[in-house]
Each structure stands twice: as C-alpha cells, then as structure tokens.
Amino acid sequence: MDSFIVRGGQRLHGVLSASGSKNAALPIMAATLLSAEQCLLRRVPNLRDIATMATLLSSLGATADRDPKEASVALNSCALDQFRAPYDLVKTMRASILVLGPLLARFGQAEVSFPGGCAIGSRPVDLHIRAMEAMGATVAVESGYIVAKAPRGLSGADFCFDTVTVGGTENAVMAATLARGHSTLRNAAREPEIVDLVQFLRAMGARIEGEGTDTLEIEGVSALHGATYEVMPDRIEAGTYLVAAAATRGDVKIDGISSEVLGVVIDKLALAGAEITCGEGLVSLDMKTKRPTAVDIETEPFPGFPTDMQAQFTALNAVALGHSSVVETVFENRLMQVHEMRRMGAEIDIAGDRAQITGCEQLQGAPVMASDLRASASLVIAGLVADGETRIDRIYHIDRGYENIEGKLQCLGADIRRIST
Ligand code: EPZ
C-alpha cells in the first residue's frame, strides 16, 4: 500500500486547474445506460472511482473506453445484456447504486448488491428504493441484493424525499426520464452535481425542469439519444486546495472553477481572513502570509456548507487563531480525522456531532492513518502545516477522489512524496 511523506512549513503558492467533478461524472456515467447510443464525456477525472464505474458498466455489457490523457470516456450500452451490479464492485464504491434507476427505467430490471455502510456512516438507500417503488417497480432484497422489477416499465410519480439525498435524487431523476407520464420529485437535492446531471440528461433529450431547486418536474419520453458532454469542475477538489493554501498562509489561484459552485466555502474562507478574488472561471486566494482566523462550521445540504469540505476546515481551524466549532449534521460518523489530528497536537474535543477546536500556532508531524476520502485530504493539510514529517498511511482513500494530489501540491511548493510501503 502507498503512503504520503509530508514535510510541513512550505507556504502554497501558484496556479492550478480544477479537474472534472468526481461526484458529477459518476452519475453522468451511470446515466449513459439510459440510451442505446454512444455518449462521449469530457473533463472526466482520472480517479479510482471513475475506473470502478467504467468496470461496472463494462461488466453489464456496455463499452466504457477511457482516455486518461484526454480526460474523456466514450460509453455505449447498445449491447448491454446484464442487469446485475456485483457485490465485488459495489463494496468498493457505493456510488454503484446509481445504476439502479437507469437499468430499471430502460430494461425494467436491475439487481444491485446492497451497498453496505462505510467509515462515515450507515449510508442507507431506503429512499432510492421508495422512489423506484413510487414509480411502479417492485423491489425486494434477496441474498444481499436489491432486486428491482418493472416488467411494464415505470410510471411517473409525485414523490417527496423524507431526507435530502443526492444519490436518491439522482437515481429518481434518471428513472423518471423514461417513465410514462409526469413525475414530480419534492425535497430534492440541489447540489451543483445534480444540475450537471440534469443538463447531461437534457442533452440526451430528457424533459426536466427545476434543477437546482428542491422540486424537479420530469416529463417521461420513450427513448433518449446519445450526447457529448463536458463534466463540471470539481468544487470539492478546488475547495480543498483553497483551504490548504489558507492553512499554509499562502496564495493560490485555481482556474476552471466558478465562485457560484463554491458558494459558502468562499464566504467561510473570507471570514478566516483570506483575500478572495473571483474572476471569469477562476478563484484566487491570498492570505498575505497571515495566520487564518478560526471559523464556525455546520454542514448542511447545498446551498449550505458542504459536508465534503468539513474535514478540510477542521484542519484549518486546528491551526487558526481562536476557538471554533465544527458540527457535522449530514453523516453520523464523519469526524474521525479529529482523532488522527490529535496525534499531531491538535486541541480538539468531540461531543456527539460537534468538534470544539482551539487553534494551535503549529502542529507536530506524526504517523497518521487515513480513514475516508475527505478525512485523508484533511490529514494532508495538517501535514503541510506541521513541524517535521508526517506519514499518512492508507492513501488509497485519497486516490479515489483526488487526481494526482501530490503532483498538484508539489507544483504549489509543497514538500510531499508518495512511497510504497
Ligand atoms: C453523495 O453521497 C456524495 N457522493 C458524497 O460525497 C456526499 O458527501 C453526499 O452526497 C452528501 O453531499 C457522490 O456523489 C458519489 P446522500 P450520497 O444520499 O448520495 C441519508 C465524497 O466524499 N440517506 O445525500 O450517498 C444518508 O444516510 C462523498 O465525495 C438516507 O437516509 O449522500 C445521509 O445521512 C462522500 N436514505 C444523508 O441522507 C437514503 O436512501 C445524505 O446522504 C439515502 C440517503
């Protein structure tokens, strides 16, 4: 397994380009199952999860040809003849559940291994299933598989999600595009990645209104055609580098990202003392070598503060001036990075879903272990501002969601290298 060796003390400085969004590319790749024609996706990040989704689609009989140099994927499911997403693949990537809606909508059947929990929580999919049932599918769980059937196709439905769910909204909107009649999805997720998925579906001929709001209106059509589409930039990747720049008191410019999709993250960085400049497709941050000021965080569904940026801000607050609280309201176990940061001298107390942080001038380098994707990124940030060397083990978590993170950080002046252990 690989590890990172990080030596702290370097201010990040320079320019980098945002990669395509993992959390937009994954549902969009699944959505290509809705058409029997070729789709070409551009600005697809070169990540483990993207490779896993390509493998899953290929296991169903689709073609998924990735060109990492071009950051493109050509997909075609005209010859698809399997409808079962196997346990071995689903267990490595929960987003495999996103083939449920498309397979059911186009083929009237789907078998998806019941995704287990993960480090950050139990991750139920009950609302995905209830949305499919609302559209007329029968769904059973048999030997660890979700077995969904709609032999006469799906029918439009008026469905309200009990909880805002990104994946649940994505499965339901994909299924509704080929359902007979009209569907209304209420309390829908509003994330920019949902907007991107809807724009791709519309490019395929789907009839959808309301993306970015909590109510989606979909008029089912008989078939969808192929499309070429450029995936949106990764707002969480961009946000992660901005936080790393703020924590190291540096100055970084990120091109290919808009301040709109970064939203409240920009506001929080400004509150932390960063000088933020937003231009046409670029965001720059300059700390003027000042130590950041601690900021309170409470995660919420978009447009609230993104849970995927919580761990990174925990690292920032750990070295910021003052006291702060970080409250995680979306997932039940997403403060694990705190335990590893404490090993680096961070002064953080946890009570339930809340972390109370007293910023230190500097952390101490130490061997630490990654537990999930965003917690791993927060440990890299902590290592960048620690005195001495930090070794981060189990960085396969990072490779799932950050394209060439060590290369990008090295370009910004960080002392980080990958070793095989
Ligand atoms: C997506 O996960 C993202 N993953 C996550 O990013 C992100 O943290 C999350 O949305 C929230 O923004 C991808 O897009 C691939 P949810 P998802 O369904 O869809 C509960 C990363 O780091 N819920 O919005 O699985 C659930 O327990 C990853 O890139 C139900 O109760 O998240 C949670 O408390 C991590 N029943 C809340 O909703 C359901 O049927 C939000 O989960 C579904 C969800």
Image: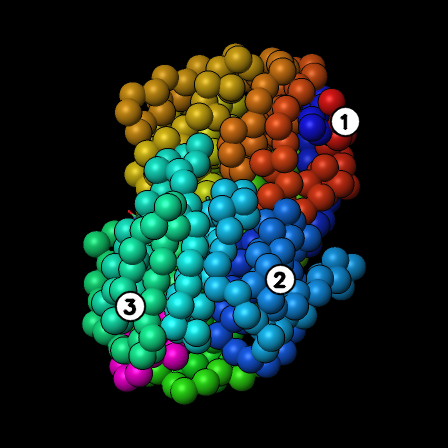
Residue 359 drawn above or below residue 85: above
- On whether residue 210 falls in the magenta region, the answer is no
Confirm whether residue 48 shows in the render. Answer: yes
What quarter of the picture does the N terminus occupy?
top right
* Amino acid at the residue labelled 1: Ile
Q: Which residue is mark 1?
A: 419
* Amino acid at the residue labelled 2: Ser
Name the mark on residue 256.
Answer: none
Q: Which residue is mark 3?
A: 137
Q: Could you tell me which residue is drawn at 27 percent across and 78 percent down?
A: 155
Query: In the image as oriented, which residue stretches furthest toward the front?
Result: 143
Confirm whether residue 258 shows in the render. Answer: no
Residue 359, image x, y percentages = 46, 20
Q: Could you tell me which residue is drawn at 44 percent across and 69 percent down?
A: 102
Residue nearest the observer in this picture, 214 or 87:
87
Nearer-N-terminus badge (3/1) = 3
Residue nearest the observer in this picture, 155 or 307:
155
What quarter of the picture does the C terminus occupy?
top right
Nearer-N-terminus badge (2/1) = 2
Name the mark on residue 58.
Answer: 2
Q: CA distance from mark 2 to mark 1?
A: 32 Å
What range of the chain is rendered magenta? 174-184
Q: CA distance from mark 3 to mark 1?
A: 49 Å
Q: Residues within 10 Å of mark 2 (few under 14, many from 20)?
A: some
Residue 248, image x, y percentages = 62, 30
Provide the secondary structure element on which disc 3 rests.
Answer: loop
Provide the secondary structure element on which disc 1 rests.
Answer: strand
**Which callout, 2 or 1, points to the residue nearer the camera?**
2
**Which callout, 3 or 1, points to the residue nearer the camera?**
3
